[in-house]
Amino acid sequence: MNSYDAVVVGTGFASTFFLKKYLSKVAPSTKVLVLERGHFFSHRDRLKAIHGESNVDNPNPAHEDTFINATKKEWIFQPGFGGSSNCWYGCTPRFLPSDFKMKSLYGVANDWPLSYEELDPYYEQVEDIMSISGPASTPFPRKKAYPLPPHQFTTVDAILNKQFPEHYISQPTARARVAVNGRGACCTSTVCSTCPVNAKFTIENSNIGVYEDPRVEVVYGAQVLSLELSGGLARKVIFQKDGKEQSVAGEIVVLGTNPIFNSHILLSSGDTHPLTGKGVGEQLGLEAIAHLDNMECVGGSTWVNANGYMLYDGAHRKEYAACLMEGSNYPFLRMERGKWRNMARFRMIFEDLPLDVNHISTSTDKTKPTVHHEQHSPYTLKAVDKMKEKLPGVLSCLPIEKIEYSVFFTSEAHIIGGTRMSSDVKEGVVDKNLVHHNYRNVFVLGSGSFTTYTPANPTLTLSALSLHSADQSF
Ligand SMILES: Cc1cc2nc3c(=O)[nH]c(=O)nc-3n(C[C@H](O)[C@H](O)[C@H](O)COP(=O)(O)OP(=O)(O)OC[C@H]3O[C@@H](n4cnc5c(N)ncnc54)[C@H](O)[C@@H]3O)c2cc1C
Ligand code: SF4
């Protein structure tokens, strides 16, 4: 059996940012094996596939074929090299300092075992690597300017920013405002799932260099099934390639397969921690559509143009969830002659709580987890009602005719939970460095580790946690 210093599973944000820091700290003789279930499918070939050019098939499995969905909620992600960086939209606000202290501030769920201040230097490093575009002032503290200038406001955003200068900001985003690092400038075409001008950060266009490092060997088409656990350590990684089971040993094992598969690999390994796989879920979102009298919503230089924090933080979080607003800027029309652009659309995103009824389990097929999502919390649903009461007041600086609401989105594409982080082994699966409390050479990365959900997009934070984990552990 082959043996490595580190066996890393997956090539998405979580694994890649971990490797970035790990490789900067370990010896030149270090040997790393990366096991990736999918394959490399380049941005160029993705564009060709969209344009219907022949002979270009995505070699990766469709996400819906990789798990069993026991309940109605949708789960969206992309298997393959770079994971969902290939299809994400690049919204990258930080969390607020209060998000890390939900129990001590609001008596809800639990505090994270690390603080905003501890994560701050790693946030900054991720923002530099992703070349984030963002404003000079944000509701979360930052020590230096974003690497790229902010995106431009729409006419509606500009009014809201004037009314709420501290709370309504140009969205911090990995959709580049100006050309950078081989990426084009965002041109607001709003098809970010495969950006035509390669403006958004992806693992492929990151120039992060980890998969070209001579210490790293990448094996594609290798799906990790389980770990052999004994004596508080992972002794072997068991994976399937070309229909054959194989195993390999690592001094450390690093799981970066997303919350659903990280939990599944641990459960398939006989992990007996009572919280493994528990509390999986997503934020809840819906759209608020504001009809405007005598005012067009035009301008703006990217898709999700702005973030509003007016309904996010405060004492209300003792009773109901935070809500983050996104100012949308995709091409939309109001179906009324003369008023085509007299409309503003906001995505309203609510945090949720990690409920144990929402969980991952194994299935009779050892390659597929089952995902159970029974409910969003009453804490979240109450916040939706409260938002509908408060939004007319928030938007009263605009010439509002009426506000309509969409039904809930079936997914926010932000899978969270399953291996939550805690100081105390009884309250979570991993410690503040994302090391499993019970198996001390197993790192369990990604947003599965979030102690609480927050309403903000998870990827900047999970990438910062990967840097923090490798920096503090080696
Ligand atoms: C359409 C869409 C839009 C999004 N937009 C945003 C956004 O604007 N902002 C934001 O913050 N987040 C966004 N997200 C969420 C974001 O993409 C995820 O938070 C992020 O990709 C998670 O990173 P990860 O590395 O943990 O997992 P992934 O990106 O899912 O990567 C997992 C990796 O593990 C591999 N893998 C899985 N199972 C195995 C196995 N058993 N063995 C070996 N390899 C395996 C996969 O092939 C993949 O390489 C979006 C997601 C989607 C789908
Ligand atoms: S809005 Fe268009 S140019 Fe900008 S990142 Fe998205 S797809 Fe790319």
Image (cartoon, rainbow, N blue to C red):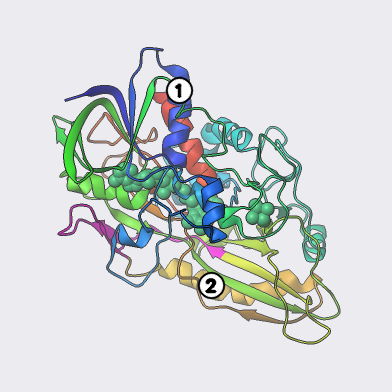
Q: Is residue 120 visible?
A: yes
Q: Quadrant of the N terminus?
A: top left
Q: Where 107 sits versus 122, above or below?
A: below
> How would you rate the neighbour count of disc 1 (Cα within 10 Å): few for under 14, some for 14-19, many for 20 or more?
few
Farthest front residue in view: 54
Q: Quadrant of the C terminus?
A: top left
Q: Position of residue 362 (x, y in %)?
A: 20, 56
Question: Of residues 243 and 309, which is closer to you in this image?
Answer: 243
In the rendered image of this protein, does residue 469 appear above or below residue 411? above
Q: On the picture, is 315 further left or further right than 264?
A: right
Q: Can see residue 262?
A: no
Q: Is residue 47 in the magenta section?
A: no
* Residue identified by numbered label 2: 384
The magenta segment: 349-372
Secondary structure beneath label 1: loop
| Mark found first going from the N terminus, 2 or 1 | 1
Q: Quadrant of residue 76?
A: bottom left
Q: Nearer the viewer, residue 235 or 209?
A: 209
Residue 68 lies, in percent from the top left, at 27, 63
Q: Residue at x 35, y 72 (%)?
A: 72
Which three-letter amino acid code belongs to the residue tagged 1?
Asp
Give the label, 2 or 1, closer to the camera: 1
Depth check, front residue: 87 or 407: 87
